[in-house]
Amino acid sequence: MKTKIDDKTLNNLPESLQIAQKAIDTGEVQEIIKQLAKYNLGVCMPHMHTENKGFVELPKDMIQVERKLVTSFVHSSEVDDETMIPVVWRYIDGVVVSASSCRHCQ
């Protein structure tokens, strides 16, 4: 899969997500991705989807949750730490979880 999206699609994203998309092809981010790969980690673009705006930046107080193969977005205080595994982290005044997946999906 290619790492770049076409200009029309890029220009329809919010500025913060345009910055993320453009950064993927920089030498600095490519090196970060290479270093993370040593630990079976990668890079993500924290985002969510809305009906009227499409892609938007994931708000700082929201978390993506995957349960039973369904993705939803909830306030971070609603996540049950006992049943969830953190799968995405980002830096917001310190490292925080941005996405979790259920431990035992049926």
Image (cartoon, rainbow, N blue to C red):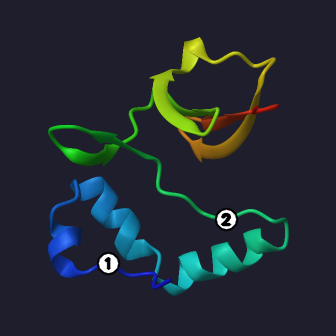
Residue for point 15% across, 75% down: 8
Q: In the picture, residue 77 is in which quadrant?
A: top right
Q: Amino acid at mark 1?
A: Ile
Secondary structure beneath dot 1 equals: loop
The x and y percentages for residue 71 are 51, 37
Depth order, front residue of 92/3: 3
Is residue 16 shown above or below 25?
above
Question: 23 and 43: which one is in front?
Answer: 43
Q: Residue at x 22, y 59 (%)?
A: 13
Q: Residues within 10 Å of mark 1 (few under 14, many from 20)?
A: few
Q: Quadrant of residue 51?
A: top left
Residue 56 as seen in the image, left or right of residue 87: left
Comes first in the chain, label 1 or label 2: 1
Could one spot residue 96 in this view of the protein? Answer: no
Q: Secondary structure at mark 2?
A: loop
Q: Is residue 38 left or right of residue 77?
A: right
Three-letter code for the amino acid on which mark 2 is drawn: Gly
Q: Tell whether 51 sits left or right of 44.
A: left
Q: CA distance from mark 1 to mark 2?
A: 19 Å
Vertical side of 31 occupied by 68: above or below: above
Q: Position of residue 58 (x, y in %)?
A: 40, 39
- Quadrant placement of the C terminus: top right
Residue 5 rendering spot, x and y as whole percentages: 32, 78
Q: Which residue is mark 2?
A: 42
Task: Give the image quarter of residue 50.
Answer: top left
Exactly how many numbered labels are in the figure? 2
Q: Which residue is mark 1?
A: 5
Q: Is residue 63 visible?
A: yes
